[in-house]
Image (cartoon, rainbow, N blue to C red):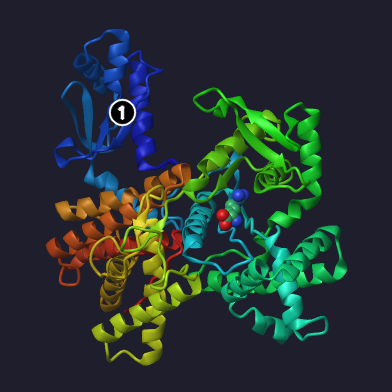
């Protein structure tokens, strides 16, 4: 069998037929059919091809179908409407496909090879280390992690970049406060204790900064010292970062996100490069001095009255900005990391910043033209009131507290559902279900939209949720356990419509995964898994498994086994675990 997905196979065959009909340059455009009466897949390319050539579209469709080589692949081909070609996959072909997927630890998902392998650099999570991670960092962390997993699975080389905010004027006030709290000789525990509540520490430092001019002056002095390389202030800063980073690592561990210290490449890593970048932009004639600041004027982002957008790379006081650091980072990811595709999983509100960054990066020659630059924007997590999610007292919601609440709520749910399960097991189930629920609820939404954070929906065992899919998985596992001994090399045969539908859905796994890799939209995979679980439920209803006998029984067990593997692998690609029992 070719190293292709089902959709790629059909597309290639329709493309060949179009070529044979004299329309080699017309795209075939094959898609899963939207309705059962349209078969399983529909080719839509004939109409445009006919129009461009002033041919009758139905007549052209007829010619294409005559050239279509789909023997053994489809059971039915039909021309519909103005020239759609509807195709229904043959049960025997699907049955063979099942056998192939069952034999393959990669579940028949093709791996890229040779020139197809890209180095994908993904900027994700990237919290500001001055404060504790809050709900605003959930999406970047979870979406970025899912994309990293999917791209690696498909065969790309992924380099994670945690572009943490570890530089800037706030660190003056924070290191000055730290100095007061722990002093020079203070033991490590004292520092850890002082920063146990990072949010609180930040708030108090800020309050002092705003209210006490002497402290504000000291804070400013600490900034200068920090930037000037003063060993003591740098040591305080480093200690602050270490502790703040430990908070992040704790969150990553709880979330099951693979980021490690090795992936951290924060803003401060680019400090030495910032003057170099600004000087280079000046030499190239891109940056000019305007009101004492160094600015690149971008005509392509001009306002309505024709004023070009100003991309400031150095302030009047000589300080550098977020935008300067991002230019240096872009150059590093391109020149040093040799990325072919750079993804920035960052709040959609930074859209303009990234548009300008990418435009300037190309202009300045920091990225070759073939390199893909993508801002993977996402919407805001909202509360019931439709405003950004806050605690009842109006504070930002700490991620650590949110995760703890998820686990607690899941624990109460499991305890109500299954009180006789031993305590330790209930704790474990709660962990997997609670964390899975939060992550899946986020990933299942199209990332570009805002969503309302809603405990009841995300923890529901019905609908497109993690608990529903995790439960579908445990249900199959229980069937497989009860099946006793059977031959796991048995052939699959598909006689019942519900069997065929489940098999078709299983065969579509590879296309769902590749679509996520291409468009960086994890919700495609969620929608796929939800449909798979629905197909499984219809199959259970229509087709007895354990009470069937002979080859029918083993074939159905094989379908169950592949469905379980696909659910586990698919959820795994989203960073979500499954359980054998729950
Ligand atoms: N630290 C920034 C924030 O919290 C996000 C950084 C995103 N990455 C980047 N290269 N700009 O908003």
Which corner quadrant of the image does residue 258 belong to?
Answer: bottom right
Quadrant in which residue 126 is drawn: bottom right
Q: How far across and how far down the image is residue 94, in percent?
A: 28, 47
| Closest to the observer, 464 or 41 | 464
- Residue on which the image places disc 1: 69
User: Mark 1, residues whose alpha carbon is within 10 Å: few (<14), some, or many (≥20)?
Assistant: some
Residue 542 occupies which quadrant of the picture? bottom left
**Left or right relative to 424: residue 547:** left
Q: Position of residue 112 (x, y in %)?
A: 53, 44
**Residue at (64%, 71%) from the top-left corner?**
244
State the SS at label 1.
loop
Q: Residue at x 23, y 42 (%)?
A: 90
With respect to residue 435, does 350 lie above or below? above
Q: Position of residue 412 (x, y in %)?
A: 31, 83
Q: Is residue 268 above or below residue 580?
A: above
Q: Is residue 250 above or below residue 53?
A: below
Question: Which quadrant holds the C terminus?
Answer: bottom left
For the residue pair 493 and 403, the one nearer the viewer reads as 403
Residue 297 appearing in the image: yes
Quarter placement of the N terminus: top left
Q: 563 left or right of 346?
A: left
Residue appearing at x 60%, y 25% in the figure: 299
Q: Position of residue 116 (x, y in %)?
A: 56, 39
Residue at figure coordinates x 66%, y 72% from the top left: 208
């Amino acid at each position: 069998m070719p190293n292709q997905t089902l959709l790629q196979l059909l597309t290639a065959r329709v493309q060949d037929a179009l070529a044979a009909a004299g329309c080699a340059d017309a795209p075939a455009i094959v898609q899963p059919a939207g309705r059962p009466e349209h078969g399983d897949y529909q080719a839509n390319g004939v109409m445009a091809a006919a129009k461009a050539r002033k041919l009758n579209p139905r007549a052209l469709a007829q010619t294409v179908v005559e050239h279509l080589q789909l023997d053994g692949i489809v059971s039915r081909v039909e021309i519909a409407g103005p020239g759609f070609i509807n195709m229904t996959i043959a049960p025997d072909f699907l049955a063979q496909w099942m056998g192939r997927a069952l034999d393959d630890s990669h579940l028949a998902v093709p791996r890229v090879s040779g020139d197809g392998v890209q180095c994908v650099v993904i900027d994700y999570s990237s919290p500001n280390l001055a404060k504790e991670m809050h709900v605003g960092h959930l999406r970047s962390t979870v979406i970025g992690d899912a994309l990293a997993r999917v791209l690696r699975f498909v065969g790309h080389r992924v380099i994670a970049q945690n572009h943490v905010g570890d530089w800037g004027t706030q660190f003056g006030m924070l290191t000055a406060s730290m100095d007061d709290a722990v002093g020079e000789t203070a033991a490590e525990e004292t520092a850890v204790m002082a920063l146990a509540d990072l949010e609180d520490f930040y708030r108090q430092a800020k309050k002092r900064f705003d209210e006490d001019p002497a402290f504000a002056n000291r804070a400013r002095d600490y900034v200068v010292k920090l930037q000037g390389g003063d060993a003591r202030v740098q040591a305080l800063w480093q200690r602050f970062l270490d502790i703040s980073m430990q908070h992040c690592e704790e969150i990553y561990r709880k979330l099951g996100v693979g980021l490690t210290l090795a992936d951290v490449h924060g803003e401060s890593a680019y400090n030495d490069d910032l003057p170099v970048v600004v000087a280079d932009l000046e030499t190239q004639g891109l940056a000019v001095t305007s009101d004492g600041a160094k600015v690149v004027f971008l005509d392509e982002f001009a306002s309505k009255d024709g004023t070009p957008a100003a991309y400031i790379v150095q302030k009047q006081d000589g300080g550098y900005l977020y935008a300067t650091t991002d230019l240096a980072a872009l150059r590093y990811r391109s020149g040093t990391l040799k990325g072919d595709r750079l993804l920035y999983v960052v709040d959609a509100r930074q859209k303009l910043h990234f548009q300008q960054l990418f435009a300037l990066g190309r202009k300045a020659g920091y990225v070759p033209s073939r390199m893909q630059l993508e801002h993977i924007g996402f919407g805001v997590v909202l509360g019931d009131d439709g405003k950004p999610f806050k605690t009842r007292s109006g504070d930002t919601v700490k991620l650590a507290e949110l995760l703890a609440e998820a686990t607690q709520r899941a624990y109460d749910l499991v305890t109500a559902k299954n009180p006789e399960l031993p305590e330790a097991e209930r704790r474990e189930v709660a962990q997997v279900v609670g964390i899975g629920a939060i992550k899946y609820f986020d990933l299942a939404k199209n990332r570009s939209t805002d969503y309302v954070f809603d405990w009841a929906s995300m923890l529901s065992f019905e609908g497109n949720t993690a608990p529903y899919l995790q439960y579908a998985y445990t249900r199959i596992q229980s069937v497989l356990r009860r099946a006793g001994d059977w031959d796991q090399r048995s052939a699959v045969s598909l006689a019942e419509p519900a069997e065929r539908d489940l098999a078709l859905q299983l065969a579509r796994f590879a296309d769902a995964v590749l679509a996520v890799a291409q468009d960086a939209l994890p919700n495609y995979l969620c929608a796929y898994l939800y449909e798979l679980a629905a197909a499984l439920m219809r199959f259970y209803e229509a087709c007895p498994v354990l009470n069937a006998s002979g080859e029918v029984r083993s074939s159905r067990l094989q379908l169950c086994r592949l469905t379980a593997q696909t659910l586990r692998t698919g959820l795994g690609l989203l960073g979500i675990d499954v359980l054998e029992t729950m």
